Image (cartoon, grey):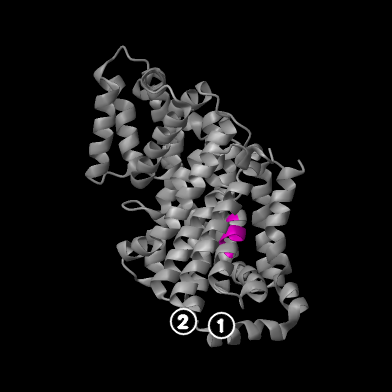
Amino acid sequence: MSAVVVFLIFFVCLVIAIPISIALGIVSVLPGAFDPSFTASGQFVIRSMLGGIDSFPLLAVPMFVLSGMIMAKGGISKKIFDVFAFFIGKFTAGMPCAVIVTCLFYGAISGSGPATVAAVGSMTIPILVKLGYEKSFATAIVAVAGGLGVIIPPSIPFIMFGMASGESVSDLFIAGVIPGLLIGLLMMVYAVFYCKKHGEDKEKIREEVEILHKKGILGVFKESFFAILSPVIILGCIYTGVASPTEAAVISVFYSLMVSMFIYKSMTIKDIWPMMVEGVKTYAPILFILAASIAFSRVLTLMQVPQSISEWILSNFHSKVVILIVINIFLLIVGMVMDTTPAILILTPILLPIVTAVGMNPIHFGVMMVVNLAVGFVTPPIGVNLFVASSLTDIPLMQIAEKAMPLIICFLLALLMITFIPQISLALV
């Protein structure tokens, strides 16, 4: 069975709404089923699935998922927002910018785009609407800024890329810092432009900020200290070598529990079990997709698909700039129709040999790939962040996507800079 037929069957499965994990399992087994001499038999596929998820770095994923849930329940995102609203809320677009910075910080806790949208959006969208901002604009800001959750470390997609490529997860985390800040900055510039063009209700904003100012800087800082400290502890443990990303993920779970239960007292022991059940429900589908993706990527390797695609691109495109633009366009299209995890695990073995052949650093490519796929969080038809944001506000998905378009353009502008200026990703590595 040829690779073209395999990908065609996979695409058909997606079109007729077969779950992506099952679709990946089907196309992994088919080559061996039609050709008994092919190495990848059914037993090989099952062994690949089980062996692929038997990974220590992979344990970080459910831990960060659970940590993000605990911090959302514990109201930690509200504490973080209060700090930034205190300092920049009175300026033009201060409140939307505070939301963007809150997404940056919360991303450094949860490592997940949808988790960031759910936790920050459920708290900040009602505040922005109350202050007079258009509901669709507030929702779009959170939906797009939530994508920063997978770029700012710790990042679940970076963990997946590290598994697929063999690169250091810690180096990938460090490489994501400046790109994440760059995208956040460009989004804030657009927020200022939007608010200057459409105006703001300065009176309502002043009243909201005054409530925080009455507490005083010490009062706000005291309330938010342990929330702000959480990403410092998580990332500090990783970058100082005290803990691996997996160990830091476990630390984040216990830290978030202690803060939520004993400092903010926003959770009780009764809340722990339902949250763990919810965490399992969230992670189990991811794990199934992950296992099937690993099996599929190994089948593709045996079919020599990565080598064939690499040879075709390198023989037809000779300019590094053109090759990187082609890869970016391809990844943007993939991000629109495929979830981040299977996309990374399937495409990394295919694309990594191509970019290394033209002299691109694998860490730099990892950042470029994750930023590309992060755009997919806010582009239909998959657009997970759009679905989450829509469920929070009952605004139609396409209406949010339309309002988010200028913010997506900011994302794409940053992507071009990240692609062609390697120092943005590699300066801290």
**Quick check: marks 1 and 2 in contact, CB under 8 Å?**
yes
Q: Quadrant of residue 315?
A: top left
User: Element under label 2?
Assistant: loop
> Which residue corresponds to mark 2?
132
- Residue at 56%, 65% in the rendered image: 72
Asked whether residue 364 is drawn in magenta, I would say: no
Image point (49%, 27%), residue name: 355
Sequence-first disc among 1 and 2: 2
Disc 1 packing (10 Å; few <14; some 14–19; many ≥20) = many
Quarter of the image where one finds residue 100: bottom right
Q: What kind of element bears circle 1?
A: helix
Please state the horizontal and vertical placement of residue 224, each as a whole percent of the image: 70, 70
- Identify which amino acid the numbered label 1 is placed on: Ile
Residue 181 x %, y %: 60, 53
In the rendered image, which quarter contains the N terminus?
A: top left
At label 2, counting other C-alpha atoms closer than 10 Å, the crowd grade (few under 14, some 14-19, many 20 or more) is: some
The segment highlighted magenta reads 102-107
Residue 172 can be seen, yes or no: no
The amino acid sitting under disc 2 is Gly
Numbered-mark total: 2
Answer with the quarter of the image where residue 404 lies.
bottom left
Residue 374 appears anywhere in the view: yes
Residue occupying image coordinates x 39% and y 71%: 136
User: Main SS type for the magenta part?
Assistant: helix
Residue 104 horizontal/vertical position (percent): 59, 58
- The label on residue 205 is 1
Point out the image quarter for the C terminus.
top right
